[in-house]
Amino acid sequence: MTQSPPGRRPRAALAMSPAAAAAVLDAESLAALAEVCDLTGPPVLDDLTTPGARAV
């Protein structure tokens, strides 16, 4: 796993809508994930090959 440059945290995008994420991830799980990376908001990524998806 590559490390982020100093001062930058890794980012993660959930490939689901906020409502779907709330249905499968409880608040404790989301909080634990937020401790190790920054969660990016919508749009939901459904094609990871696009320049916009790679920018997230």
Image (cartoon, grey):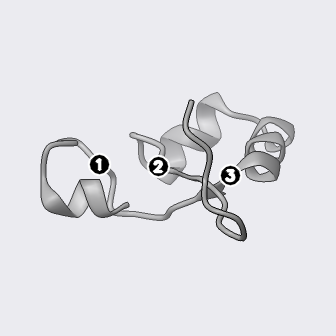
**What residue is at 66 percent from the left and 60 percent from the top?**
9
Q: Secondary structure at mark 2?
A: loop
Label 1 CA crowd tier, 10 Å (few <14, some 14–19, many 20+) = some
Nearest to the observer: residue 1 or residue 25: 1
Seen in the picture, residue 47 relative to 44 is either above or below; the reply is above
Name the residue beneath numbered marker 2: 13
Q: Kindly indicate whether the residue at mark 2 contacts the one at mark 1 (C-beta within 8 angstroms).
A: yes
Name the residue beneath numbered marker 3: 37
Q: Quadrant of residue 54?
A: bottom left
Per the rendering, the mark at residue 10 is: none
Q: Secondary structure at mark 3?
A: loop
**What residue is at 26 percent from the left and 55 percent from the top?**
53
Q: CA distance from mark 3 to mark 2?
A: 10 Å
Name the residue beneath numbered marker 1: 45
What amino acid is at disc 2? Ala
Say whether residue 45 is left or right of residue 41: left
* Residue 35 image position (x, y, % from top left): 82, 50
* Residue 2 image position (x, y, % from top left): 55, 38
Q: CA distance from mark 3 to mark 1?
A: 17 Å
